[in-house]
Image: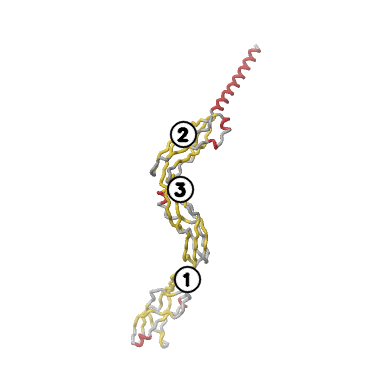
Amino acid sequence: MQVIKDNLLLKFVSLIVATILFVMLNAESSTPVEVEFPVSYNVPADFVLIGHPPSSVSTTLKGPWTRFQSFRQGDMQPLVVDLSQMGEPGTIRQVVSVSDIQAPLGLKPVSIRPSEWDITIDRLVERSIPVEVAMPHRPAFGYEIVDMRVEPSEVRVVGPLSSVMNLDYVQTRTIDVRGREDDLKVDVALRNPPHPIRVTTKQVFVSIDIGEELIQHPIREVPVKVEVDGQVLETKPSKVMLRVSGPRRLVEAMQASALDVTVSVEEELEKGLKTFEKTIELRSALPERTQLVAPIPRVVVSVPE
């Protein structure tokens, strides 16, 4: 009886061991692993891909685990999409299957994703476009950009026809002139245009001339003084507004009380005129590099009886 029990126990243990070995062997022979296979595109000469088609596909491989242990990324052959027969710009729907995957020896592809996607190509063209200087800020207060030169002023860009023809300029990296009162000369890099356009020049030379800001400034309520032989003549209006041009720091500092405005009346008095209209005259000297701006005001002068 004891022998029978021992035999049954031995058979039971053997069955368990056999089951475990069976499961392990089956797992060893069908382990699924997901890997990324590179995708390359065979594009016709003088054409270029548009957008961002997949650069890889996710593929599930099955095979012995020992084979995966010796698996290297370099073992994977890229999935080649042949577009050489596309002779015109356009879009096609690319469909791939596991049969297109060249898996390493001993491994079998069983699924792939994505399995289809759109591919668009366009003609590859080259053209010259202007360079735009990115300069969002102003120089120091009272100063301005007098002149600016860019060398070269145009650069060559290469890319899809549809994109290149819609590109108006290539912009530089930002040039900061905040607080500057003097000229600036600098090499500055160009910003990358939108993908997949590329610019053949990496940087340009920019010369910026900075000078005092010239403005026209109104000076209001300037009194008009007309005096003959100690007698003050009446004018209408008695005060005028003058417009003065010149550097901002000078013209904005000018005060109406510092300006001596009058009218020449000698000729009219000799003719005996009692009321007449004349253009005012400025007897005080204006600061250097400033001047009156037309129209010069006129006033009506009245001579008392």
Residue at 56% from the left image edge and 32% from the top image edge: 68
How crowded pointer 1 is (Cα within 10 Å; few <14, some 14-19, many 20+) is rated as many
In the picture, which quadrant includes the C terminus?
A: bottom left
In this view, the residue in front, 148 or 13, is 148
Q: Position of residue 195 (x, y in %)?
A: 46, 48
Residue at 40% from the left image edge and 40% from the top image edge: 85
Earlier along the polypeptide chain: callout 3 or callout 2? 2
Q: Secondary structure at mark 1?
A: strand
Residue at 50% from the left image edge and 39% from the top image edge: 38
How crowded pointer 2 is (Cα within 10 Å; few <14, some 14-19, many 20+) is rated as some
Question: Can you tell which mark lies on residue 247?
Answer: 1
In this view, the residue in front, 64 or 274, is 64
Question: Can you tell which mark lies on residue 196?
Answer: 3
Earlier along the polypeptide chain: callout 1 or callout 2? 2
Distance, label 1 to label 3, CA atoms, is 47 Å
Q: Position of residue 250 (x, y in %)?
A: 48, 72
Earlier along the polypeptide chain: callout 1 or callout 3? 3
Q: Which residue is disc 2 drawn over? A: 100
Residues at circles 1 and 3 in contact by the CB criterion of under 8 Å:
no
Mark 1 or mark 3: which is in front? Answer: 3
Q: Quadrant of residue 31?
A: top right
Distance, label 3 to label 2, CA atoms, is 28 Å
Residues at circles 1 and 2 in contact by the CB criterion of under 8 Å:
no
Residue at 36% from the left image edge and 82% from the top image edge: 301
Query: What's the residue type where badge 3 is placed?
Result: Pro
Q: Is residue 50 visible?
A: no
Q: Secondary structure at mark 2?
A: helix
